[in-house]
Amino acid sequence: MKANKHLTKITVLTLTTACILFGGLMLLLNNSNKTNHDQNMNAYLGTNSQGSPGYGVVSDNIVATEIGMTILEQGGSAVDAAIAVSYALGVVSPFASGIGGGGIMLVYPADGTDPIVYDYMGSSPANTSGSIAVPGFVKGMATVHQDFGKLSMDDLLDPSIKLAKEGAVVTSLLVRMITNSQAKIDPAVRDVFLPGGSPIPAGDQLKQPALAETLETIKSNGTDDFYLGEIANQIAKSNSGVTLQDLSSYQVEKRIPAMGSFDGYEVFSSAPSSGGVTLIQMLALSEKLELSKYPVDSPEYISLLSEITQVSYNDRYQNVLDPNFYNVDSTELTSADHISQLAGKITPIVNLTQTITVDSLAESNGEENTTHFVICDQNGMMVSVTNTLTYWFGTGKNVDGFFMNAHMENFSTNASSLNKAEAGKRPRSYISPTILAKHGKPVMGIGSPGGNRIPLMITEVLDRFFKYDQSLQEAIEAPRFFNDQNSVYVEDNYLTTATEEQLREMGYSVIRYDNPLFYGGVNSLYVDYLNNKILGGADDRRNASWLWNRN
C-alpha cells in the first residue's frame, strides 16, 4: 500500500547556467507531480491504458482512511467504504459528524449511469423552536447501501463498534475541540471527554461505551431502530424537541446533482438546498470574467474573486431553497444566461456597497465545523461526501453516546424569510460535495468543511489546480483568503506587504487571521489516467490523510 499524507514534492535547485543548459529537464522535473489534464483524459480514451488506476481514500482522520481502504480491499464498493468511513469519523472525530447529524453523499457510479445526490441532512421537526433537526445520517447510510452496497452492513459497522468499545487514539485536534466546546458538552458524557474535569489528553484512548452499544443496536436491529425503535424512544424522551412522529416520517431525498462546467470538465455538485449551485456559479463566473489572467496572489485576483463570492452568495439567498417546498430550478440557476446576469452585477470598480446577506445563526456564528472525504474504488465508482453536526459537537446534547446536531440553526431568524423553519423542511447549507468528470467517467472528487466558507475554499483550490498548474497537494496547501462583507481574511503567508496595502487602498479591510480551521479542510482525489494511479490531496489544516493502492 502506498501511504501518502502529502503528495511527493520534487524540489529542484537550479543555478543560472543549469537553467540555460537543462531548462527543459528542469521544467519536466518541476512539473513531474502535476498532471496535464488533456493528456490525462486522452490516456483514458485508450492510447495509454494500463488497467485500473487502483483505489483510494482521503479523509480527515488516518484511522478512518485506513478503514475505508480495508473495506475496498475486501471487495467493497466505494459506497461501502463511504458508509464505513462515515461511521468511523463519528467515533474518532465526534465533534464534526456522527449518527446524530446528517450529510450529503454524491455518488458517481462506475457503470456509466448518471450521478446521484443522496441528501440525508436534518429536517425540521414539527416543533420548530429548537436547535435540533431530525437526524438523517443513519437512514442515509441505509439508503445508499441498499442502492450500491456489496458487503453486509454488519461488516461496515464492525470497525466503528470496535473503535468505540476498545478506544481510538485522541488527536491534538480532538483535544482542541473539546477544550473549545467543554462548556456545552453534555454532563452524561463529560467523564468520557473531560475525565477529572480536563480534556482527555492527546495520545490517550477515547473509549465510548454508550456509543458502542448504540452502534451494536443498529447492527442487531437495523436502521429502523433509530427511527422507530428503542433509540428513537431515547431521542424522543431526551427533551431534544424531536418526537417519534418526526423520526418515523423522516425521508432521505435522492436528487439530480447541480451541474456545470469548469476547464472543460463536467462539474456535478450537491443539489439545493445545499451549496452546489453556488460553487458552480463561482466557477463559471471565474472563467467568464477571466479571473486566471491575474496572478493568484494579486490584489486584482482577490478583489475579483471577492466580488464573485458576494454576487453568488447573494443569489443563493434569493434562490437556493428546499425544492420540496419551493420550485427551485438548479439548471436555470447555473445556465449561461443566469451566469451572464450575475456577471453583469460585477463592475471593474470595487463595489464596497455590495454585501453578503446573512440570515441564519449558523452563518453569523461562522464555525469551522463539518468533515469531508472522497473515495474511489477499483471499478471506477467515486463518492464525495460531506457530513456534519452544524456546530462543533452539534448542540452538545448527547443521547445514548452520540451528539445531536444543531441543523435548525441554519434556518433563517427572520419569520418572513423563505428559509424559515417549517416541519419537514431542510434549511439552506453551504455543503458542496463535488465530482468533476469527462467522457462519462469521474476524474476528481473534492469538498470541504467550513460553513459559509466552503464554496470559496473549493473554488480557490480548483482554480490553482486547473488554471495555475499547481499539483493537487500544492493547491490544497496554498494559503487562502475569505471575504466577509468588505473585510478580507488572509492566512499569514498569503500576501506581500505591498499587496496588502493595495487592497487597503481599494477600500478593503485586510485581516491576517492565522486560524487554519477557519479556511476549511479541502480533501480531494484525482484519477491520473496518464500515469495509471490515483493522486490525493489531504488538508493539513485538519490533519487529513490519503491512501491509495493498485492490485
Image: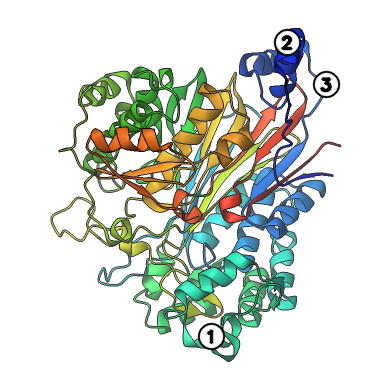
Q: Where on the picture, by quarter, is residue 200?
A: bottom right
Q: Residue at x 70, y 43 (%)?
A: 6
Q: Does residue 316 appear to the left or right of 10 in the view shown?
A: left
Q: Residue at x 45, y 65 (%)?
A: 135
The residue that mark 1 highlights is 190
User: Looking at the image, which residue sits at the far bottom?
Assistant: 196
Type of amino acid at the residue the image marks with label 3: Gln
Q: Does residue 34 appear to the left or right of 100 in the view shown?
A: right
Measuring from the top left, give residue 426's x and y in whole percent.
34, 55
Which element carries disc 2, helix, strand or loop?
Answer: helix
Measuring from the top left, give residue 161's x and y in whole percent.
70, 71
- The tag earlier along the polypeptide, 2 or 1, is 2
Which element carries disc 1, helix, strand or loop?
Answer: helix
The residue that mark 2 highlights is 24
Q: CA distance from mark 3 to mark 2?
A: 27 Å
Residue 50 is labelled as 3
Asked if one can make out residue 259 in the rendered structure from this viewpoint, the answer is: yes
Q: Does residue 82 appear to the left or right of 104 in the view shown?
A: right
Q: Indicate whether 319 appears above or below 144.
A: above
Report if the CB atoms under discs 3 and 2 are less than 8 Å apart: no
